[in-house]
């Protein structure tokens, strides 16, 4: 059975994910459902005892590049990451790419051959991914 078949057989979940939609790519909310900001997502992700997880848990988080730009943005990102670890978080992966860039990469892959994105447990060149996977990445919440 293909991965696509498995996903389409998965029913709705309590967090608002619709039947057949992609499952969450990390320890955070499903794509587009973390609507209260990155601090709320970190608080939710660290509510259960992560250190009891035998294989660790990763939290993927996506920002628009302008949010973490410059000294102020860098300090804010550092504080967010420090908070995550202080609360028991184990691994965090930060992406800084805009939805517009991803959409342009879909339409003009020749312009974005070096664009690397976090998929789920690994990173890959965006243009090498299937359209379904590209759309899942585009649909992830972009923290502004």
Image: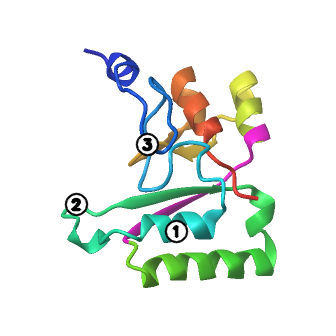
Q: Nearer the viewer, mark 2 or mark 1?
A: 1
Q: Is residue 102 magenta?
A: no
Residue at horizontal 36 percent and vertical 71 percent from the top: 90
72 in relation to 44, above or below: below
The Cα atoms of the two marked residues, 2 and 3, are separated by: 24 Å
Residue at mark 2: 55
Residue at mark 3: 14
Furthest toward the left, the residue is 54
Q: Secondary structure at mark 3?
A: loop
The Cα atoms of the two marked residues, 2 and 1, are separated by: 19 Å
Residue 80 % position (x, y): 60, 76
Q: Secondary structure at mark 2?
A: loop
Residue at mark 1: 42
Residue 128 % position (x, y): 53, 28
Q: Is residue 95 magenta?
A: yes
| Tag shown at residue 16 | none
């Amino acid at each position: 059975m293909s991965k696509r078949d498995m996903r389409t057989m998965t029913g709705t979940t309590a967090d608002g994910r619709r039947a057949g939609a992609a499952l969450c790519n990390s320890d955070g909310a499903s794509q587009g459902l973390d609507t209260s900001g990155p601090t709320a997502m970190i608080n939710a992700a660290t509510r259960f005892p992560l250190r009891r997880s035998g294989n660790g848990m990763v939290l993927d988080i996506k920002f628009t590049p302008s949010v973490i730009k410059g000294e102020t943005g860098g300090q804010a990102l550092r504080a967010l990451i420090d908070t995550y670890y202080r609360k028991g978080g184990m691994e965090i992966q930060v992406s800084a790419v805009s939805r517009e860039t991803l959409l342009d990469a879909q339409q003009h892959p020749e312009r974005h051959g070096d664009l690397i994105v976090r998929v789920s447990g690994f990173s890959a060149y965006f243009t090498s991914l299937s359209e379904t996977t590209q759309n899942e990445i585009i649909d992830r919440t972009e923290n502004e």
